[in-house]
Amino acid sequence: MNGKSIPKIFVLDTNVLLHNHEALKSFADNEVVIPFAVIEELDKFKKGNDEKGRNARGVIRTLDRLRAKGSLRDGVPNEVGGKVRVVFDYGDLNEVGLIDKPDNRIISTAYLLQKTGDRKVIFVTKDINARIKADALGIKVVDFEKQKINFDEMYCGWKEIIVEHGDIDRFYQHGAFVPPQNTLYPNEGVKLVSRDDPKHSALGRYDARARQVVRIIAQDKTIFGIQARNMEQEFAMDFMLDDRIQLVTLIGQAGTGKTLLALACALHKTLRDKKYEKILVSRPIMPLGRDIGYLPGSKEEKLENWMQPIFDNLEFLLATRGMNAKAEKGAQALIDNGTITLEALTYIRGRSISGQYVIIDEAQNLTPHEVKTIISRAGAGSKLVLTGDAYQIDNPYLDSSSNGLTYVAERMKGQEIFAHITLTKSERGTLASLAAQLL
């Protein structure tokens, strides 16, 4: 015995490959098995123009490259170690009490490999029901863990520091505080609290270049007719108004003000400060097959249905500024003159977006790869704000720990051009706050 571990067999479900087309490279020196039913399902998805279609085509191209090295049926060396094999035999479905359909053939393939072989077999799927069925058959089953974070322990964007009473007085006087034990991330929000009097406090943000906590620029400011109502909103507005921060993520439940604050800051920076040429607002199309083609009318008419929450917030902001009678027309005018562009995420891929304030709403419904694609579109002079509620996810293969919004928030911490805040307090109203907490 040389002490080398025996390679495991990982059987991949279709949804894993549609979630991440590079999943084949995620299993080190082990053997990756692709059931033939998965190949057939990839063939159905490959013509799609959405992310699933692109991932399906990416996997098919990878398998075609591997095929040049030998027979996929016998197994060929993987690009990162181990090998990849396509398995046709899925055994007797009647033996395990499964009806004949693609999902069950995939599970049965794993069951057969476990039954007839002497190596550990692990079934990898993002489908909860498939995990339950596989587990009932005695198969080791796991979710695809790459690009997944621990949501309960993720970065919240701010920290409380207990200081002496005089430190806070000097902070208000000079606008800076040097933390004695520096464990802060760049642009992390800081609440300085007096050791003797908890009510004596101050808000700041860590400037990594200066290596000190500085006053936040948005405190007590009215931005396009609204003011921050709590500490977290003050941090959020500060991040979104600072031109040095190019990417901001806001996570919070319904009513915490994510979209409203983002729009207010975007309007302020575009119309008043003239920092950006225009505002681009987009959100994923999740219901009705995630495709705007299911609705009648032109692209603009279809988008109007999906973008109604944006219209609602725009009308509120314009009405707050004393334009009650013209709020609706004013919102439409901003769209008609090109100041605000509403776009489906489908049409963002492949573009280079420069000089724009970009807001991606409901970003919790995006995969990590989709968010990476969107962020990589940002050109010179653009700022991106991603907002969403990690507890309201409509994508069946994502959860609070695996969606693109929380993944980016956790992975980007520590970068000087990034800031994040988790909003916890609902400001929409008593009823909305109770619903978010109790229902």
Image (cartoon, rainbow, N blue to C red):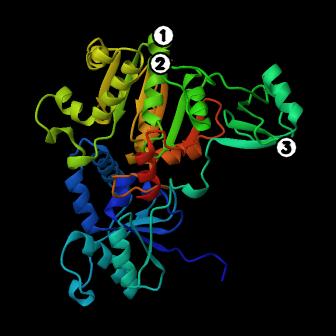
Q: Residue at horizontal 25%, vertical 74%?
A: 105
Q: How many angstroms separate mark 3 from mark 2 (CA)?
A: 36 Å
Foreground tag (1 vs 2): 2
Mark 1 → mark 2, Cα distance in angstroms: 9 Å
Q: Residue furthest bottom?
A: 95
Q: Residue at x 30, y 79 (%)?
A: 108
Q: Earlier in the sequence, mark 3 or mark 1?
A: 3
User: Compared to 215, does 386 lie above or below?
Assistant: below
**Cβ–Cβ under 8 Å for marks 3 and 1:** no
Q: Can residue 179 be seen here?
A: yes
- Which element is circle 1 on? helix
Q: Secondary structure at mark 3?
A: loop
Residue 274 in sight here = no
Q: Which residue is mark 2?
A: 224
Amino acid bearing label 1: Arg
Disc 3 residue type (three-letter): Arg
Give the mark nearest the N terminus, 3 or 2: 3
Q: Which mark is residue 272?
A: 1
Q: Earlier in the sequence, mark 1 or mark 2?
A: 2
Disc 3 target residue: 195
| Left or right for 381, reference 347 | right
Q: How many marks?
A: 3
Q: Are marks 1 and 2 in contact (CB under 8 Å)?
A: yes
